[in-house]
Image (cartoon, coloured by chain):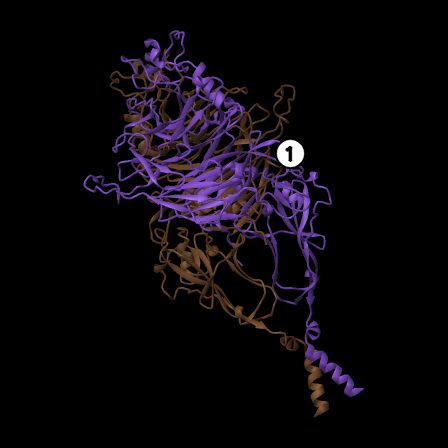
Chain colours: A brown, B purple
Amino acid sequence: MVRFYVWISLTIVFLFKAADSNLTPRVRLTEKEVNFRKWGLPGNTVRTELLQGPQGNSLYVGGHGKLLYIKLDTSILPEEVDFPKRGDKKSSVNPTASNNCDYDITTLHIANDSHLLVCGTNGYHPQCHFVNRKPFGSFGESIAAEGIAPFSVTERAPSVYVGNELYAAANSHANGNSLAIRRLGLRSIWPDTNKKEQRYVSMVLSGPREDPVQDRVYTFLVERNSDTRPEADIWTSWVTQVCAADVGGTKSILQKSWTSRLSARLSCGIPEKRMYFNRLVDVAVLKAERWNDSMVYALFNNSWGMSAVCVYTMGDIDRIFTTSKFRGYNDNLPSARPGVCVKESTKLPSEVLRLIKDHPEMESPVEPVRGGGPLMVSHRYYRHIRVDGVTGSDGRRHRVLFLSLESGGVHKVLDHDGEAFIIAELQPFPNKTRILNMLLQSSQRKLYVASSSEVVEVDLKSCQGYGDQCVACVQARDPYCSWDRTQCTSASRNGIQDVEQGNHAVCTNTDGVASPSRSKAQKIFRWSKHYLECPMFSSHAQYVWKHNGADKECVRTEGSCLLLIDSMTPEHDGSYECVSSEGGYSSTVVEYDLETESGAGGLVASPLASACLLLLLALLG
Amino acid sequence: MVRFYVWISLTIVFLFKAADSNLTPRVRLTEKEVNFRKWGLPGNTVRTELLQGPQGNSLYVGGHGKLLYIKLDTSILPEEVDFPKRGDKKSSVNPTASNNCDYDITTLHIANDSHLLVCGTNGYHPQCHFVNRKPFGSFGESIAAEGIAPFSVTERAPSVYVGNELYAAANSHANGNSLAIRRLGLRSIWPDTNKKEQRYVSMVLSGPREDPVQDRVYTFLVERNSDTRPEADIWTSWVTQVCAADVGGTKSILQKSWTSRLSARLSCGIPEKRMYFNRLVDVAVLKAERWNDSMVYALFNNSWGMSAVCVYTMGDIDRIFTTSKFRGYNDNLPSARPGVCVKESTKLPSEVLRLIKDHPEMESPVEPVRGGGPLMVSHRYYRHIRVDGVTGSDGRRHRVLFLSLESGGVHKVLDHDGEAFIIAELQPFPNKTRILNMLLQSSQRKLYVASSSEVVEVDLKSCQGYGDQCVACVQARDPYCSWDRTQCTSASRNGIQDVEQGNHAVCTNTDGVASPSRSKAQKIFRWSKHYLECPMFSSHAQYVWKHNGADKECVRTEGSCLLLIDSMTPEHDGSYECVSSEGGYSSTVVEYDLETESGAGGLVASPLASACLLLLLALLG
């Protein structure tokens, strides 16, 4: 019979080249294997803001006209507070917005013990409200949010709350082209907007430092490349610093504006291959005890639909700002180096201010840690990145990334000394869903994934999905998990695990040895079709059927390895073992015994026939 | 049961985005479906040169120390001639070569009616031999081939035979760095070697033109990018012209050197996305009646493991050389434009010669036809390209490409008005094999594919693989094929076909309507496992099982759509149809009828039981 092959198989060769098995999720975990809790979101939001409560036992969710307050350790329904549409319709002239009076929440902060700061689009007149936390919901003071929060629900405008002040990078006019990094509060900074085409991605505090005066706020952004030659990418990625202590310059220069704003290129690529990722998509920071050891995980993509993760340290970024040459400036630097934070920026010498004003670009780029290569390059298109530090059963600290996929999945990735290993693809949603946001609640080891209609809580320490054997638990290399001699469960001090290697040898034979579901011999009628099914647990494992000493190849389906028997004959009698091999360890997944039931067997199958025989014998006897 | 999914499925989402179904081979054709003839090659060659005999009924194959002469329309064994190893071992000093006395054939030309020109490495002392054609094999004159043929078997050195002269682009010294385009013959041209790092890819004659003096030889090459900035690719692609009439310059300047050598960038990419392909891999030319309509199909790749095909016309290339500005030269051009071919190049004014010498680069690049985009961009990594012009059953001329894959497959691609459609993936080799060379014998509609151990003849007009229905034949969109009202066979004037659309409507109901292999009701014993299999002919089609009016999804394996019945019960009784849908046409591929055989049914199945009953009745009666 003529046979063709589906195109998926045709692409394997390429993909094997493109992605080595480490960049293939080892397993896929759905709600069957992992504990997911879900909360529905009112309406259908296009943007979801997530904020965790201080104790990590509560969650604030901002959406379309509503703010939810979820008490995580209870099962009581979330509390809600409404943000009314903007009343005044006359000024709603923006044609692009379908119903442009909506209040879509775009910004969420914990302002202080008593209040949240909640900002939203408010029909292209962005507004912030202080909202009471306990009791939840009553409104406090409200402020206009131009330059603090975005005008449109699709616009990204990162901000951080430091002390009693808000640092924000947003447009100050509905028509755009009014981006700047601003500070709202007692020491408000309101610089002229730069004319560059930029998209702000993320904002973080670089600190706290030994000397608080040196604390900085870093803003990560993409900017249209000034280099317009065809070879050059359309976008470039940057990190910008401003000093927290900065209160602006003198009356004559940079008054009420940053005197410490410097920018440096973020480099991410494989230079020898001239492969560069220039489009920053998202940023996650893994805080360390010492601020300069804190790691910045940056997610990039390129026009080829690929993604890359590059890792930088706060210390490296700081070093560029404090040591690099200033682009386009070759004279000697003033004694007080521009960009170094000072107590009283109003007293800075004008030459320093002028240099900051005229040459805000560093010549040297920030290079990733460890030889400057990406941690991983993938043909998947990731949208969000989060990073967690996990103490494994070995007592060591491990780094785990969470990368959201367009399909609605999340890749759980181990960063082991700069080598990425995709532990699993989590599937919080039953169907293809666009992930709008993710929040990692490290203390509780929970990940919250938001779609337009629900928030799903992923329990990162639910480990039973890896199987009920020590080896399976160890080969998973999941630092959240270890083998407690009875099951694969959340990592504990004396659990068995090998995050570094996933080496099965750490398991002793007594640690739950393979116990395949052996069933007694099945009788299969002669000439009839039959099939044996073997679930494929790991995409990194090889599966094969063994029958009477001979290997039989799998007929692979999405999730299992089949053995098809077109017509049962005695040659098919005997035992069938489905053997999986991974990392030098082989085990029998399932085992069957088949036996051909010949025609005469029909007799046995027929009680009537046997009864008749007995009766006949009786009569004859 | 816990279920995981193999990584292949995890990559589907990305691939669907990356490659629309048109860039997925619709079908896969192996030796089961297509007529392949095979000839073994002596030894294990790392390079295979293919040359077709003048009548297209013979094939010359050059390999490791041997030249084969294959008479295609006979079954007699190929004739062989040996090229002995180089005797003199003393000078074999090159350490890189393992056994560097070998004579590996690198160049094959038909010199004239009586002789072939055969060149080989000859142990790093390249040498050419004139070899008698009939009778085949006896050696004629031999010449040293430095600067004509490569020193190493891995080196590419294209050449063309025009008139009695050989144009070649090769190194003239074993140590490399001695590349140039040279002409051997009565009017030998031996220019100084340029110091640029280049790799010559292909050489073709641009002509014959109305005025023979204007005939040119084009050489296609990649060159290390002089632009060393990180964004710029390492390589750039070029086409270089020299005039066939060129006999060199004056005593004072460019004597014995080209006076007409000009180079222009080959551009291939998607400017708005800044996606460029800069590394030329292979070139194929589709000759047209008028030389300037001839089409140049250029295969490029990039560092991301992707490929692209861009198409240029000879006329467009010519226009750049005859109209573009000269890079770095802004004064008025001399009356005789440099690079325009002249009868007596020795009489060219020195200012023309100097301009050619100092500014051999065109400012404008050669842009692809039709809006300047690639014909196709693929995530597969192609190595060779060939192009054929085929007159379909509609009497129209169609263009078909053949692209070799690293896996040993060949993609047969329709270029329909600049839109690529991958008709099929041909599988000439049973296993993963590296394709070393391809030769298209258009007149015979044959493609010859060479590996290190054999040459396979692919019959391009063997069409039965597309199935035994008009619709299947038409949806294949293969211009070599059409439906002759009884079968899918080589295209004929009044055959039924629709290369443009693949629209099934051109088939009348009488043209072999779907006739699924309907089998009478099968009795399946209750509680037993069973499966139904449906072959998936086309990767562009959707397949589904219909049972009692309900759709059941496929369990997809590599080549078929399965329906698994875990335990047979009466609910499973009834008819099962596997329905495929493609291009708005649905047809039943296979059809089954199942019926549960209950326990009592065993009675019927048991002759013994029935006999007993009869006997019993007789006794009681």
Q: Provide the residue designation for mark 1.
A: B394
Type of amino acid under label 1? Asp
Farthest front residue?
B135
Q: Residue B146, image x and y in percent?
A: 28, 31
| Chain where mark 1 sits | B
Tally of marks: 1
Q: Residue B132, image x and y in percent?
A: 37, 38
Which of the two residues, A223 or A358, is positioned nearer the viewer here?
A223
Farthest right residue?
B621
Q: Where is residue B321, by image quadrant?
A: top left
Left or right: where A443 falls relative to B492: left
Judge whether residue A117 can be spotted in this image. no
Q: Determine the secondary structure under disc 1.
A: loop
Q: Residue A356, image x and y in percent?
A: 34, 18
Q: In the figure, A312 relative to A550: above or below?
A: above
Judge whether residue A2 can be spotted in this image. yes
- Callout 1: 10 Å neighbours few (<14), some, many (20+)? some
Q: Residue A105, image x and y in percent?
A: 55, 32
Q: In the figure, A316 relative to A474: above or below?
A: above
Which of the two residues, A426 or B506, is positioned nearer the viewer here?
B506
Q: Quadrant of the N terminus of chain A?
A: bottom right
Q: In the figure, A615 relative to B523: above or below?
A: below
Farthest bottom residue?
A621
Which of the two residues, B574 or B497, is positioned nearer the viewer here?
B497
Q: Where is residue A475, by image quadrant?
A: bottom left
Which of the two residues, A513 or A460, is positioned nearer the viewer here?
A513
